[in-house]
């Protein structure tokens, strides 16, 4: 009887998270003349949202509670961002700041867990926490544009690390040895 194995979905999850985060963060940083913000609407629903939910389910099936929780949570995060960007009725002043604050708190808990798991996850969740704190402040009340820009640059760093981790996992698997540390 053949063994029923599920391939490691983590590189896909990191790619979906990294690409979607790069689009939104570059818009928050003021790059692309607003095109990043427009591009992230559909991407946040499908690549950032649905794909991360699927990856989370697969991680739970593989018995990985931490990564399952992370990917399911951020799949819901990106679907919520899509809904927020697509529906003006939910865009009350400060609403995005409250939403981001709750995910900053969740990412703080995830960071505490990640400290034990690996140095790269430690830095990824620390950067994510910094990003979400800056964006929370930036979108709180009347808004603080400089904090949003700072959060955008911190998000871009977070995204680059997630994409590096994707490349590392895929390249090392393809080559059957450690090519990227």
Image (cartoon, rainbow, N blue to C red):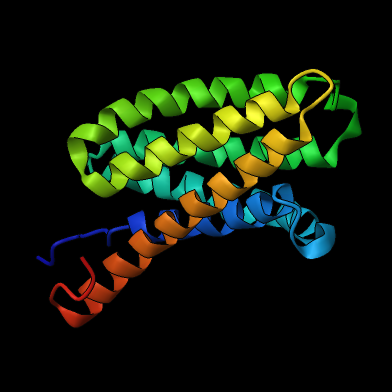
- Residue 131 drawn at (x, y percent): 55, 37
The residue nearer to you, when weighing 131 against 68, is: 131
User: Looking at the image, can residue 48 be seen?
Assistant: no
- Residue lying farthest right? 88
Report the side of 95 relative to 115 (left or right): right
- Residue lying farthest left? 1
Q: In this picture, is 103 found above or below 54?
A: above
Q: In this picture, is 178 found above or below 148?
A: below
- Residue 110 drawn at (x, y percent): 36, 29
Query: Where, by quadrant of the figure, is residue 80 drawn?
Result: top right
Residue at image position (73%, 53%) is 27
The residue nearer to you, when weighing 48 against 114, is: 114
Q: Quadrant of the C terminus?
A: bottom left
Report the side of 176 relative to 72 (left or right): left
Q: In this picture, is 89 found above or below 7?
A: above
Residue at image position (49%, 53%) is 157
Q: In this picture, is 87 found above or below 154?
A: above
Query: Where, by quadrant of the figure, is residue 69 drawn?
Result: top left
- Residue 24 drawn at (x, y percent): 67, 50
- Residue lying farthest bottom? 175
Report the side of 7 relative to 157 (left or right): left
Q: How many marks?
A: 0
Residue at image position (23%, 45%) is 119
């Amino acid at each position: 009887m053949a063994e029923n194995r599920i391939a490691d979905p983590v590189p896909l999850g990191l790619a979906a998270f990294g690409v979607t985060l790069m689009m939104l963060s570059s818009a928050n940083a003021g790059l692309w003349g607003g095109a990043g913000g427009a591009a992230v609407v559909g991407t946040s629903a499908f690549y950032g949202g649905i794909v991360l939910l699927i990856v989370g389910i697969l991680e739970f099936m593989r018995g990985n509670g931490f990564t399952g929780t992370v990917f399911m949570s951020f799949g819901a995060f990106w679907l919520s961002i899509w809904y927020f960007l697509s529906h003006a009725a939910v865009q009350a002043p400060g609403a995005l700041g409250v939403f981001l604050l709750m995910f900053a708190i969740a990412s703080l808990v995830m960071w505490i867990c990640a400290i034990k798991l690996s140095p790269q996850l430690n830095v990824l969740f620390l950067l994510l926490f910094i990003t979400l704190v800056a964006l929370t402040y930036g979108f709180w009340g009347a808004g603080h544009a400089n904090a949003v820009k700072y959060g955008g640059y911190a998000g871009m760093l977070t995204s680059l690390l997630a994409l590096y981790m994707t490349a590392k996992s895929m390249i090392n698997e393809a080559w059957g040895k450690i090519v990227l540390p």
